[in-house]
Image (tube, rainbow, N blue to C red):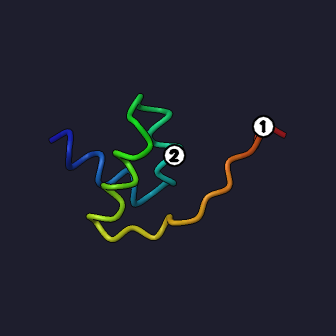
Amino acid sequence: MRTSALRQLVLQAPAPVIAQALGFHDKTTTQVVAEVGGTWNRYAPSDHSQ
């Protein structure tokens, strides 16, 4: 169940965001994106609080 949920999350948001929110290593979530065919391959992290 946890793997399935992670796969759904990385299809909806960038892997680095999911990794930080859930405490995963960013390489783990990036690998999951590649496995499920996600399109979040470019993400420029920055301060989006404004």
Identified at 51% across, 54% down, the residue is 14
Which mark is nearer the camera, 2 or 1?
2
Residue type pointed to by label 1: Ser
Is 16 left or right of 28, judged from the image as shown? right
Q: Residue furthest top?
A: 23
First in residue order: circle 2 vs circle 1: 2
Secondary structure, mark 2, is helix
Q: Are marks 2 and 1 in contact (CB under 8 Å)?
A: no
Q: Which mark is residue 24?
A: none
Q: Residue 47, located in which quarter of the rendered image?
A: top right
Q: Is 16 or 5 nearer to us in this picture?
A: 16
Please name the residue that numbered disc 1 is placed on: 49
**How many numbered circles are shown?**
2
Could you give the CA–CA distance between mark 2 and mark 1, rounded to whole angstroms? 17 Å
Which residue is pictured at 30% across the width and 55% down the height? 32
Q: Identify the image quadrant of the N terminus.
A: top left
Q: Foreground: 37 or 31?
A: 31
Residue at x-position 39% and y-position 60%: 11
Q: Quadrant of residue 35?
A: bottom left
Q: How far across and down, in percent of the image, does residue 25 sit? A: 40, 36
Q: Secondary structure at mark 1?
A: loop
Name the disc covering residue 16, or none.
2
Q: Pointer 2: residues within 10 angstroms few (<14), some, or many (20+)? A: many
* Furthest residue in direction right, as rendered: 50
Placement of 44 over or under 26, stated as above or below: below
